[in-house]
Amino acid sequence: MGELKDVAETQVGLVDRVKGLGNQVYLAGLGLVAKVEEEGQKQLDKLQAAGQAARGEKAAADKKAVLVAFGLVETLKSEVETLKAESQKLFGDLVASGEKRKAA
């Protein structure tokens, strides 16, 4: 009878451990949502500020979406130039590597 009791206790311990791990995963998910919301607000504020700088306007409640849109456009313009330069460099590196491999 002792073996059956040991098996039951092991199962209860395992169930408790799984519940604890499930709770941790749930809490991690809540933490992720909080971080995403926080980062999203930071990015929204950043885009709004870029839109204000581009248009030279203050943020009125009815103009926030317009300023965010202008900020997004201005941010994308600067990012495109950076990405273009990086991609050209990467392409050049790949061509050089290909030439070395072909010569070998």
Image (spheres, rainbow, N blue to C red):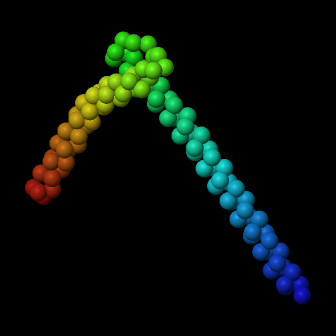
Give the percent coordinates (x, y) of residue 10.
79, 74
Give the percent coordinates (x, y) of residue 63.
42, 20
Image quadrant where residue 80 sits = top left
- Furthest residue in direction left, as rendered: 103
- Asked whether 28 or 63 is in front, the reply is 63
Where 22 falls versus 3 (above or below)?
above
Q: Is residue 10 left or right of residue 66?
A: right
- Asked whether 65 or 50 is in front, the reply is 65
Quadrant of the drawing holding the N terminus? bottom right
Numbered-mark total: 0
- Asked whether 88 or 47 is in front, the reply is 47
**Could you tell me which residue is drawn at 79 percent across and 69 percent down?**
13
Where 25 falls versus 10 (above or below)?
above
**Could you tell me which residue is drawn at 63 percent across and 46 percent down?**
30
Quadrant of the drawing holding the C terminus? bottom left
Can residue 88 be seen? yes
- Furthest residue in direction front, as rendered: 62
Q: Is residue 2 left or right of residue 30?
A: right
Give the percent coordinates (x, y) of residue 2.
89, 84
- Furthest residue in direction right, as rendered: 1
Q: Is residue 20 left or right of residue 62?
A: right
Can residue 71 be seen? no
Where 77 falls versus 55 (above or below)?
below
**Could you tell me which residue is drawn at 31 percent across and 31 percent down?**
76
